[in-house]
Amino acid sequence: EIQFADGQKYIISYSAAGIGDLVVVAKVDEATAFRAVQSLIAKSILFFAALIAGTLLISFVASTQLTSTLRELSDATKEISRGQFDIRVEPHTTDEVGGLVEGFNLMASEVSRLMREAAEGARIENEMTTVRAVQTALFPEAQANFGPLRISGHFEPAGQCGGDWWHYSRVGKKVFIWMGDAAGHGASTALVTSAAASASAVIEMMGDTSPGQALTILNRAI
């Protein structure tokens, strides 16, 4: 940096020309030289300001979307705690948060399915308990004596209820002994045995009926 006699400042640069002792000298006005630097600094400041503003904007949008998704997950979790298992959260991204949402939806769907199966199982359990109670009422006492005739019976289904049925009764001088097995198992077969028990009670009251006639009437009734 050199100041000439007129007070003007210049930036002097020099370098050997590589030819003998020649030296190349360049003179640039200091104000002109630093004007370019100042312009570069101003542009750099503007660029970094824009970069920071863009980064803040992107961060704000991303954080807003993230907190929004997390808020939805939190609300959905509260709904599940109240027993609302069919709730779903819409995934807005495909990143880790989106994977978390998909996992939550899968969990809620699985819990909802298990709750439905549990409710259905409880309903069937209650129905089967009722059917078994009704079926048990169709069986007579396990032991009976009718003069010289001694009757002993035992019934134990493989499941809660089955299609096996037996019964006895004394009408006048006759002793009726019924034994049957409806195909299958479960509530439907228990209903068939209930129908057989009802029909047998009617047949017993009909008086003088042969075994063949009794079975014919029983088949028609069922």
Image (cartoon, grey):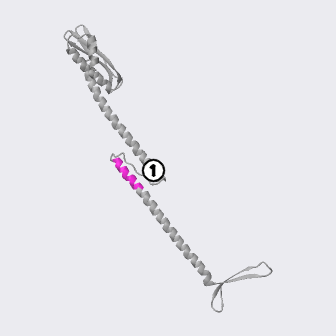
Q: Nearer the viewer, residue 206 or 138?
A: 206
> In which quadrant of the rendered view does residue 108 lie?
top left
Give the residue drawn at x 55%, y 74%. 43
Give the residue drawn at x 44%, y 60%. 63
Dot 1: element:
helix
Query: Bounds of the magenta span?
Result: 69-81
Which quadrant of the rendered structure holds the N terminus? Answer: bottom right
Can residue 161 be seen? no
> In which quadrant of the rendered view does residue 19 lie?
bottom right
Percent position (x, y) of residue 27? 68, 84
Tell me the crowding category of disc 1: few under 14, some 14 to 19, or many 20 or more residues within 10 angstroms, Cα based.
some
Q: Which residue is mark 1?
A: 100
Query: Could you tell whether 131 is left or right of 32 in the image?
Result: left
- Residue positioned most to the right: 20
Badge 1 amino acid: Leu
Percent position (x, y) of residue 57? 47, 65
For residue 70, above or below residue 193: below
> In which quadrant of the rendered view does residue 107 lie?
top left
- Residue positioned most to the top: 148
Q: Is residue 73 magenta?
A: yes
For residue 117, above or below residue 98: above
Percent position (x, y) of residue 88? 39, 49
- Residue positioned most to the front: 220
Percent position (x, y) of residue 112? 37, 42
Q: Is residue 215 magenta?
A: no
Give the residue drawn at x 43%, y 50%. 101
